[in-house]
Image: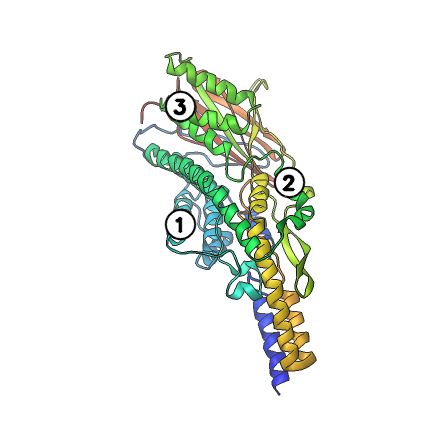
Amino acid sequence: MSKACLTLMCVALLTGCASRSLFVSYPSQAAKWKAELAMAPVAVTPPEAGPQDNPPPEENAASSASGDSLVPANLAAEPPASPVISKLEAASSGADGVLYLQELGRVNQLQGRREASRQAFAGAVAAYDEEDASARIQVSSLAATGTSMLTNDNARAYIAPDYERIFTRAYQALNYWAANDATGTAVELRAAALEQQVAANKREKEIAKAEQEAEENNVDVGQFDGYFEGLNAVAGDVKSSFQNAWTFYLSALFWEAHGEYNDALVDYKKALEIHPDADMLKEDVQRVSAAMNGKKPDGGMVAILYEQGYVQPRAEFSLPIPTVHGFFSVAFPTYALQDKPRPNSLRVLDTAMQPLGETRVLADVGGLAAKDLKERLPGMLVRQTLRATAKYNLQKEANNNYGALGAFATQIYNLVSEQADRRSWLSLPAYAQATRFTLPQGEQTLILSTPQGDATLTVPVVNRGLTVIHAVALPGRLITRVLPVQEGPL
C-alpha cells in the first residue's frame, strides 16, 4: 500500500508542478506573450504638461506597411490592457515578481501605456530596494537551500542582474521624458548612473565571494572552462556585464540639451571609454567641450535611440558534474552564438533621400547577458554540485526504504526536475543603438529605414534644442515615438 501511495504522490507532484514555471522554461513562457505582443495594437498617448510647458507637435506621421506610431498626439488615450498585460500582471506577485514587473513595464511602454509602464517600473525599483536592504542585514550563502536543493535554480527567487536594473532606470527616464517631466527624467538618469557606479564597486566582491565558496565546497571551477567557451564568443567585446554606453548616451544628450555641459561631458566620455573607436562619440566630446567655451553652433540636434529586436534567451545543455558518487549530468544555462542576432542599423534620410545619419551599436545586450552569466558561474556550479549530491542521496534513501519502486520514482522526479535556470528579461532589445545629427530650426520630415520597415516622421527642431526619436524594431513592425523637445536650463 505504501508503495502504491508513493507512486501516486510522485505522479501527482509531477503532474501539478509540470505546469508551473519551476518546470517550464521561461523562454517558452515568454515566446507565447511575445507572439501576442507582435499582434497587439499600439496606440498613442496624450502628452502630459511638464514643468517646461513645451507644446508638443499637433501631429507626427509615421507611415509604413509595418510601422506603428507612438508619438505625442491628442488623438487617443492609453489602450486597454491586452491579454499579454493581464498575464504579466498575474505573474508579478510571485517569487519572480521583479522579472515580470520589468517585462510588464517594457511591454506597456511598447504598447503606448505610459502610466502603466511607469507604475510597473516603479514596482521593479521598489523590489530592488527591498533586495538591497535584505542583503545588508542578512548573510546569504551561494549554496542551494530549501526547495532549490532538490529541484533546480528556478526555485530561487529571481534577482535582477545589474544590466537589467540599469535598463529599467533608462526606460523609466524615457517614460518621464515622454510626459515632458524634465525633473523626473533627470532623477532617473542620475539613478541609472548610480546603479552603474554601485555595480562597479560590488562586482569584484561578489565574484571573489563565489570563488571562495567554490573553494570551501571543493568545487574546481576551472575544470569546466571548456564547456563555457561559447559564453565568451557571445559576450564578444563587452568589457563588463553592467557598463551600458547606450544609457550613458541617453543621459549625455539630456544634460547637453539643458546646458549641463559638465555632466554631459562626463557621460559622453564614459560612453567613449566603452567604445573607444566610435567617431560619433569623439565628435560629441569635442562638441560639448567647445560649448563649455561658449562655442555653440546654430541649429537643433536630432537624436535617434534605436532598439533592435529581442535579446536572445538562454539555452540549455547537459554538464557532467563530478561528485563523490561519480559523475552526474545536470542541466545548465548558457548562450549559444548561433542564436545571437546580427546587428542591423537604422538609416535616416531626408525627403530628397539624402542620408542624414546611421545608428551604431552602443549596447550589445546579449553580450551583457552572457558576460553576467559567466561571472555567476562559480556560485551556480557550487549549487549544482551540492544539488547533484542531494538528489543522489534522495534516490539512495528511496531505494533503501521503498526498494526498486522508490528508486524509479525518484529517478523520474530527478529527470523532470532537472531544468536549467533560463530566466532573464526577454523583452529587452538585442542591440541598443543611436545616432544624431543637426538640422535647421522648424518642422522637418525624416525617413527612418530598417529591415523591419520604414517610417516617415515630421519632427519639431528647435534652435539649440534636442529632439529625440525613440524607435523600436520588433519582428514585423517598427514602433516610433517622438519625445518632447528638451531645451534651456533645468
Q: Residue at x 59, y 63 (%)?
A: 387
Report crowding for label 2: few under 14, some 14 to 19, many 20 or more residues within 10 A (C-alpha): some
Disc 3 and disc 1 in contact, CB within 8 angstroms: no
Name the spot of residue 71 as percent of width and height, x first.
45, 34
Q: Of label 2 and label 1, which has the lower sequence position?
A: 1
Disc 2 and disc 1 in contact, CB within 8 angstroms: no
SS category of the residue bearing label 2: helix
Q: Which residue is mark 3?
A: 256
Rendered view: 437 above or below 247: above
Q: Of label 3 and label 1, which has the lower sequence position?
A: 1
- Disc number at residue 232? 2
Report crowding for label 1: few under 14, some 14 to 19, many 20 or more residues within 10 A (C-alpha): few
Q: Residue at x 62, y 50 (%)?
A: 221
Q: Which residue is mark 1?
A: 132
User: Which quarter of the rendering shows the C terminus?
Assistant: top left
Q: Nearer the viewer, mark 3 or mark 1?
A: 1
Three-letter amino acid code at the position of disc 2: Asn
Name the spot of residue 154 as percent of width and height, x first.
55, 58
